[in-house]
Image (spheres, coloured by chain):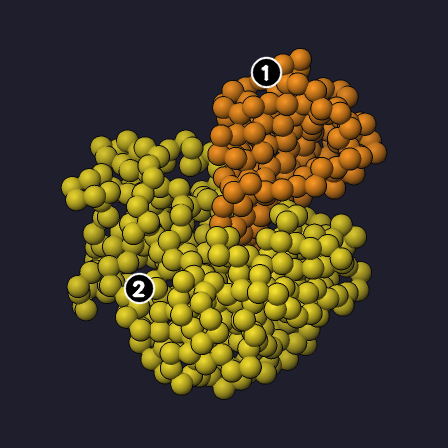
Amino acid sequence: MLIPYRRRALAVALLIQAASVPAFAALGADASSIASDGLKMKGMVRVSAARAYSVHEIQTPSGTLVREYVSPAGKVFAVAWRGPKMPDLRQTLGVYFKQYSEAPRTSLSDHKHFAIALPGLVMQSSARMHAYFGRAYVPELLPQNVPVTDIQ
Amino acid sequence: MTRSIALAPIAVILSVVGCGGSSGTSTMPTQPPMPTGANVAMITVDAGPSTASGIASVNTPFVSVTVCAPGSTSNCQTIDHVEVDTGSYGLRILSAAMSSSLVLPQEPNGTGGPAIVECTVFADGFSWGPVKTADIQIAGEAASAVPVQIIGDPAFPGIPTSCSSTGRAEDTVATFGANGILGVGPFIADEGDYFTCSAGVCTSTAIAVALQVSNPVAYFTADNNGVIVELPAVPAAGSAALTGSLVFGIGTETNNGLGTATAYALDPNLGVFTVTYKSQAYGNSFLASGSNAIYFVDATIPTCSNSTAAPGFFCPTSTLNRSATNTGVNNASSAIPFSVANAQGLFNGNTSDVAFEDLAAPNADNTSFDWGLPFFFGRSVYTAIADQNTPGGIGPYVAY
């Protein structure tokens, strides 16, 4: 199932081909380090330049879109996903997967939803049949003047 | 801090006789007369299984399900605290909640074929376990040879990376928050992620629909076209444990007619309808008893921080009164008033409360408005299964 989304005109101003920008990396990693996420997820990568950050998109074969938000300092400060399958969260969250997986279960955890707001990691996730949505960001890496509502 | 489950056993025991014993400001919910009949199972909304130490469930409806080895009426076990979910499909039981004497046959992928194992991917983690065949009894209804998932079965310890990398494991009662989940949504098969395993090696495999974990209601010999969830209204401050009914069949008995309810047809492929909130249409919306709050997008409402009793839920400074409009694909439409209370205030108000009609949270899915259990309080909510005939038309639809 393809899930339409409203493109954020404010944030995403320009699309350029992925070939010119080899960078792709997990949450918290240097954008310039590796293109491992795209390779691991066998996805097509494309890059959008935005006002205060760039967005790297992986369209996975399952139809899920993964977006990685890269700050001017070259760090992936946020990730977001939407589509019929959960993405590879180990790859997408990188070193933050451990923090996510060890965070204590809360009353909100009802299988269809998940949320944590740790000092070092904020994450929300929703799921229903064939539809997975989520986002995660690292508050200390968030560039100034970037509203967290941009991350989706 | 987290909500302690220490008081839960008291709440569970007292729920059977009413609300005596709960202290504080919350009041007794208005308990409608419970329908009676072989097609009626009692729902309990309480803090969850006592073995799920740590976190109390909120807004979670549970039933008891009797699971038998196929063809047997004696090799059976009644499993309590199975969550009722009108937003998913099929019965899943935690291996840890099953007696070792109840041995269910493994479902093979074709006669003599390798074992079928499923990776159920939730928003908050994954559940890995084999598909087995069971006879199921709920109240007076019986279903034979239903494919069910046994979560955390020690016979299948090797979890494929493509499953384990989707999140954190929910393979114990404590991490799952229930002894199982009963998916009674508007479809039959779960269309999940399946594997076949032999000699410890598991391979992602497409599985025939008939072999998939499936809504047991469709397997009942009668009353098999849908369900009704009936729960009492709860006061704004919340309620201690309460009871309601899971009624099987729509218009098949004297106790399950549509009455004055209106049917809202669902998308025949996705099982969704449209909710309009603040002039924004959310086309992938649904009524799921397995969602424990009203989940929707509204960036103007603050969320409770991690240092509160209700991290992640909405925490407005005062209760907000809002409205949203449900519209079926048949264009049936109704405006639904609802409230968003400060979740920290709700949880701190009476620590033994487990039911809240005004509990809400942000939805990471910005294409849907997910009504969750608060919608069900004070209503009879019908869920008709796809392609089944009912007095309200052919499913899938919801009615209330």
In the image, which is nearer the foreground, mark 2 or mark 1? 2
| Residue B317 can be seen, yes or no | yes
| Residue A98 can be seen, yes or no | no
In the displayed structure, B363 sits above or below B61; it is above
Residue drawn 37% across and 33% down?
B160
Shade representing chain B: yellow
Residue drawn 81% across and 27% down?
A51
Q: Position of residue B73 (x, y in %)?
A: 19, 69
Q: Which chain is orange?
A: A
Q: Between marks 2 and 1, how big is the CA–CA gap?
A: 51 Å
Q: Position of residue B192 (x, y in %)?
A: 40, 46
The chain identifier of the residue carrying mark 1 reads: A
Q: Position of residue B108 (x, y in %)?
A: 22, 44
Residue drawn 23% across and 48% down?
B106
Q: Which residue is mark 1?
A: A34
Front residue of this view, candidates B164 and B268: B268
Q: Could you tell whether B156 is left or right of B169 in the image?
A: left
Q: Which residue is mark 2?
A: B219
Residue drawn 77% across and 21% down?
A72
Identity of the amino acid at label 1?
Ile
In the displayed structure, B133 sits above or below B208; it is below
